[in-house]
Amino acid sequence: MLRPILGDFSSIICFKAAITGMEEALGEKATAIALTAAGRYRGKTLAQELDLANSSMSLEELADKLDHGFGKDGTRLCIVEKIVQEDNEVIKVHTSETLCSADEPQGSQRKCTYTLGAIWGVLEETFNQRLQGKHTESILRGGNYDVFEFTKLS
């Protein structure tokens, strides 16, 4: 435990205020880049903590591990619902209750930059493969999940 009285977690309200403050100071684009990079760092760290580097587990097993690390039994960043591979090049991660979408109004254009980065970092470390990631479907804009799509880079 990092803090003996308050515990290891902070509120969504404080994190969202940090995001908004960064956007006001740096602009949306620079903030998105910084938050995605921070998320990737966290994801790579989690992959190492869970001994996932160069793993050959199934995507279903990986989804369970990520849900444990990021979900209600972990840091509570999001729920990882499922991971699917559409073809040999594209991996889609379906998430819900993402930190970035919390308390956002329906129709908001908010992207899940930190959460995207965290999942991205885990996948790159697990598969030892460079990926390009993007947020392709949002619960804020009619989707059933926040979906992150990752494409393998040559």
Image: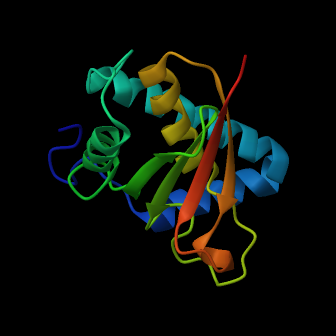
Quadrant of res 105:
bottom right
Residue 66, image x and y in percent?
Answer: 33, 43
Residue 22, image x and y in percent?
Answer: 71, 50
For residue 77, say whether it is visible: no
Q: Residue at x 21, y 50 (%)?
A: 7
| Residue toward you, 57 or 103 | 57
Q: How is the image coloured?
A: rainbow
Q: In the rendered view of the protein, which quadrant contains the C terminus?
A: top right
Horizontally, is 30 left or right of 87 in the view? right
Horizontally, is 81 left or right of 21 in the view? left
| Residue toward you, 9 or 32 | 32
Residue 25 in the image: above or below residue 54 = below
Residue 116, image x and y in percent?
Answer: 58, 46
Q: Residue furthest bottom?
A: 106
Q: Residue furthest front?
A: 87
For residue 39, say whether it is visible: yes
